[in-house]
Amino acid sequence: MNQILDITLTSRKIVLQFLDGYTLAQLNTIPEGFNNNLIWNIGHIIVTQQVLVYKLSGLPLMISEEMAEKYRKGTKPEHIVTQEELAEIKHLLFETINRTKVDFENKIFKNFSEYPTSTGYTLQSAQDAMLFNNFHEGLHIGIMMSIRKFI
């Protein structure tokens, strides 16, 4: 299991390069032809990991309800992210995964509500959710790599 979350941490290190390499204005820019921006994609991967692993396990999320609503599946950027929100996102980028590692070691993931993903794959356990999350983050990193060419 550590390998799965180590891959997630590697993904998050790539995402951190976007947070550190672009200004707040650039992070908030939605290029022509795109529906979202860099910062929305980053918020979205944080929220999705929490929903897939914790919510489907019947456990409380580490993120606020407000954040979950802003970045959940089916949303798009509808506000300009502030420096304060950026700091929170940057903190949660790694804190959520570090906490997931601890929680997994403490065996808190006992129940799971089966979930059919939009790709057609059905998640049946928290471990499935963690594996699928890596795929999901890879997709969004690809989108971010495309966006960066236009900002």
Image (cartoon, rainbow, N blue to C red):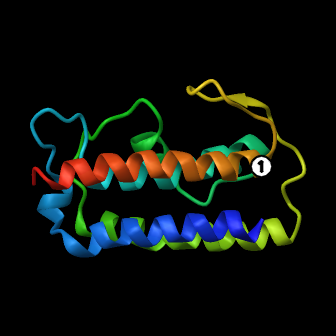
Can you give x and y, in whole percent of width and height, for residue 62 in the image? 61, 60
Q: What's the residue at 10%, 54% (across, down)? A: 151
Question: Can residue 58 be seen at all in this image of the molecule?
Answer: no
Q: What's the residue at 25%, 40% (across, down)? A: 36
- Residue 143 falls left or right of residue 102: left
Q: Nearer the viewer, residue 64 or 137?
A: 137
Q: Tell me how many marks there are.
A: 1
Question: Can residue 15 be seen at all in this image of the molecule?
Answer: yes
Residue highlighted by disc 1: 126
Picture quarter with the N terminus: bottom right
Residue 19 vertical placement versus 75 (above, below):
below
Q: Secondary structure at mark 1?
A: helix
- Residue 135 falls left or right of residue 113: left
Q: What's the residue at 24%, 69% (across, down)? A: 83
Can you give x and y, in whole percent of width and height, for residue 145 in the image? 27, 54
Amino acid carrying label 1: it is Ala
Can you give x and y, in whole percent of width and height, for residue 12 in the image? 47, 67
